[in-house]
Structure formats: structure tokens, C-alpha cells
């Protein structure tokens, strides 16, 4: 493995708000672009592309993605971004709209280059302390958890807090992390020198070349290709999103796929298609608030593309529900 390189593993933050006003309107979507830019500046990333519909707005960032719903914000950033520095600014902006925080969830995998991470991300303990210091006291149901696996390079870190322990109507999410990508497939995420395209058009070409557009054919896609390599996309399908981010360099290659559950799509099939795009040597899948049947279907789908489940860890966290963390390696690869 390379001594240093770009950190593909993302940090993910989900903030859920509520309002005492019976007429909510568009809620957090009222935040102007300048306000979002100010928050992203503290995180150390920028918007490179955007797409929205009647349900929510999505932004492809220079380091991953941002989704803004009327009462929910999801921000996911990679590299050496300082994601948690967005917590307090988002809470303050929400207050101007008479919205107050009722739940928070922070998740991430195991960094490839932990020594390169800045404050407050130098350790999970430091992240938890920072979160504890920056969220309202009424989020009294709190838990920090590290779910291990048989693979030392893959464990799942979760911090969750809420004003109630078991809220209703929490949608389930699937977060897939892939490393050791097939080199031939990873090469498709490198741009050709002087290709005459901008990031949007090059991203569109990568989406079609790799088959990412077939993972969920119903989704509208907002994509972007970086120079000289790398790729990000957000997919919008009704009130659900999916997102993919790729760091294709050999030695620290990484790709992620995330989606939000819905009764109208086959999550296991989408995960299977995403894994096939990259041909990874190692995969981890974290599902939050999904039923046992969905977790087993995802396990079967990943094993159908030549990987074997090596471990499965489970924990229950407040304000989110059950977290199931499964790891897989290619059948030719030893633990």
C-alpha cells in the first residue's frame, strides 16, 4: 500500500430537524447558496455540480456530496475535510428557519491514512468529544460504537444521538465501501489528457461507459469527473438518493456507493450492480434500520459477484435503530 495518498473513505453526517410551525414550507431548502458555501468553506470543500427535484436538493462537492431536504441534511466528505465543523453552523442556520435539531448520526469506515486527518478527525474518540460538545443537551439519547470485523482494515464507526430513543419513520440506509478495485475497471475513471471536456461532460461519459447509469435506471443523475482522475455522482429518484464516489489510483483505490431505502426499488440488486462496476477485492456494507430480510438479500447479492462474507457485526444505536456491518473479500483473497 502507498505510504500516502488521497483518503477515499468518507465521513458522513446526517442531521434531522423539526419545527413547531405546522406550515413548514420548504424548510431547510430555503437556505441560500451563500449560506451553504460558508458552511462548506469551514469543511474545506466546494460545490461543483447540483441537481434538485420537488423533494430535495443534491450537490456534488469537490469532496463527495450534500443533500438538503426540508427537515434533513446529509453531508458526506472524503479526503482531509473537516466535516464535523459543519455541525454548529448547520444548527445555527436551521434556527433562523425555526427548525431545531432532534437527531444526529455520524458514520465512517476506517481511514486508509489516519495520520493525515486534521482536527477533529485524528481519532474516533476526538470526533465523539467534538460532537458531544457541539450538539444540544436535549439530544440525551447518545451512543458511540465501533463495530469490528475480521478485516483489520475495515471497522464501522457510529455516533448517534436523539431527543427520543426510538423515533418513527426512520428510512433505512445502505453504505458500501470498496477497496482494492480491479485495475482495468478503475482505469475508466481516469480522464484522457486534453480530452476537450469539462467536468460535467467527462462525468457524463464515465457514467455511461461504466454502466453506473444502469444501477438505477429511474434515477436522474448529476455527475462530475475530476482531472486527472476521480468521479462523483448523485442520483435522484423521487424522495430517495444514491451517491457514488471513486478514488481510482492503484495502491489506495476506493469507491463508495450509498442509497436510501424505499419500497419502490430493489436495494440488493442496486448494491450488486454497484459492486460489479468496480470489481473490488474487499467490500464492507453497513445497513442502518433495515430489516433482517434486506440484510440477507444484500449479503446474497454481493456473494453472487464472487465475494465471500467474512464477518457480520450488529449493534443498536439510539435515534437510528439497528446497524448491521458485513465485510466481504474476493474468494481468491485471504484475510
Image (cartoon, rainbow, N blue to C red):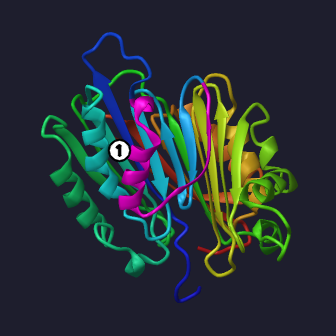
Q: Residue at x 38, y 81 (%)?
A: 115
Q: Which residue is drawn at 47% across and 61% down?
A: 45
Q: In which quarter of the image is residue 142?
A: top left
Side of 215 relative to 99 (left or right): right
Question: Which stretch did the figure color magenta?
Answer: 28-53
Considering the image in quadrants, where does the N terminus appear?
bottom right
Q: Which of 179 and 247 is in front in this view?
A: 247
x and y, in percent, of residue 33 in the image: 46, 43
Q: Residue at x 36, y 21 (%)?
A: 168
Query: Residue 305 colored magenta?
Result: no
Side of 158 relative to 330 (left or right): left
x and y, in percent, of residue 292 in the image: 52, 34
Side of 235 relative to 304 (left or right): left
Considering the image in quadrants, where does the C terminus appear?
bottom right
Residue tagged by mark 1? 105
Query: Residue 51 colored magenta?
Result: yes
Question: Is residue 319 depicted above or below 150 in this figure?
Answer: above
Q: Quadrant of residue 42?
A: bottom left
Q: Could you tell me if residue 139 is visible in this image?
A: yes
x and y, in percent, of residue 70 in the image: 43, 27
x and y, in percent, of residue 213 in the image: 79, 44
Secondary structure at badge 1 equals strand
Q: Which of 14 and 98 is in front in this view?
A: 98
The outermost residue toward the top is: 22
Question: Is residue 276 depicted above or below 269 in this figure?
Answer: below
Amino acid at each position: 500500500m502507498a505510504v500516502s495518498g488521497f483518503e477515499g473513505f468518507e465521513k458522513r453526517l446526517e442531521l434531522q430537524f423539526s419545527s413547531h410551525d405546522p406550515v413548514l414550507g420548504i424548510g431547510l431548502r430555503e437556505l441560500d447558496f451563500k449560506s451553504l458555501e460558508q458552511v462548506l468553506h469551514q469543511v474545506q470543500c466546494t460545490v461543483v455540480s447540483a441537481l434538485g427535484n420537488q423533494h430535495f436538493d443534491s450537490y456534488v462537492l469537490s469532496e463527495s456530496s450534500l443533500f438538503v431536504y426540508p427537515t434533513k441534511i446529509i453531508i458526506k466528505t472524503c479526503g482531509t475535510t473537516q466535516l464535523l465543523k459543519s455541525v454548529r453552523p448547520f444548527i445555527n442556520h436551521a434556527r433562523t428557519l425555526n427548525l431545531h435539531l432532534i437527531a444526529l448520526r455520524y458514520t465512517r469506515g476506517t481511514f486508509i491514512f489516519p495520520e493525515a486527518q486534521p482536527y477533529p478527525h485524528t481519532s474516533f474518540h476526538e470526533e465523539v468529544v467534538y460532537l458531544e460538545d457541539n450538539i444540544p443537551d436535549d439530544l440525551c439519547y447518545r451512543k458511540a460504537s465501533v463495530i469490528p470485523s475480521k478485516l483489520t482494515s475495515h471497522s464501522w464507526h457510529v455516533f448517534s444521538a436523539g431527543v427520543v430513543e426510538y423515533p418513527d419513520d426512520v428510512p433505512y440506509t445502505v453504505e458500501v465501501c470498496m477497496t482494492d478495485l480491479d485495475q482495468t475497471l478503475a482505469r475508466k475513471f481516469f480522464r484522457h489528457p486534453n480530452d476537450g471536456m469539462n467536468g460535467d461532460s467527462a462525468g457524463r461519459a464515465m457514467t455511461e461507459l461504466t454502466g453506473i447509469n444502469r444501477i438505477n435506471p429511474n434515477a436522474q443523475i448529476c455527475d462530475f469527473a475530476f482531472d486527472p482522475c476521480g468521479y462523483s455522482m448523485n442520483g435522484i429518484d423521487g424522495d430517495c438518493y444514491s451517491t457514488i464516489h471513486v478514488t481510482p489510483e492503484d495502491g489506495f483505490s476506493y469507491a463508495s456507493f450509498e442509497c436510501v431505502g424505499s419500497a419502490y426499488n430493489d436495494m440488493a440488486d442496486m448494491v450488486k450492480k454497484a459492486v460489479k462496476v468496480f470489481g473490488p477485492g474487499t467490500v464492507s456494507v453497513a445497513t442502518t434500520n433495515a430489516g433482517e430480510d434486506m440484510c440477507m438479500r444484500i449479503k446474497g447479492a454481493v456473494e453472487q459477484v464472487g465475494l465471500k462474507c467474512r464477518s457480520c457485526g450488529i449493534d443498536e444505536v439510539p435515534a437510528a435503530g439497528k446497524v448491521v456491518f458485513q465485510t466481504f473479500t474476493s474468494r481468491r483473497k485471504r484475510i
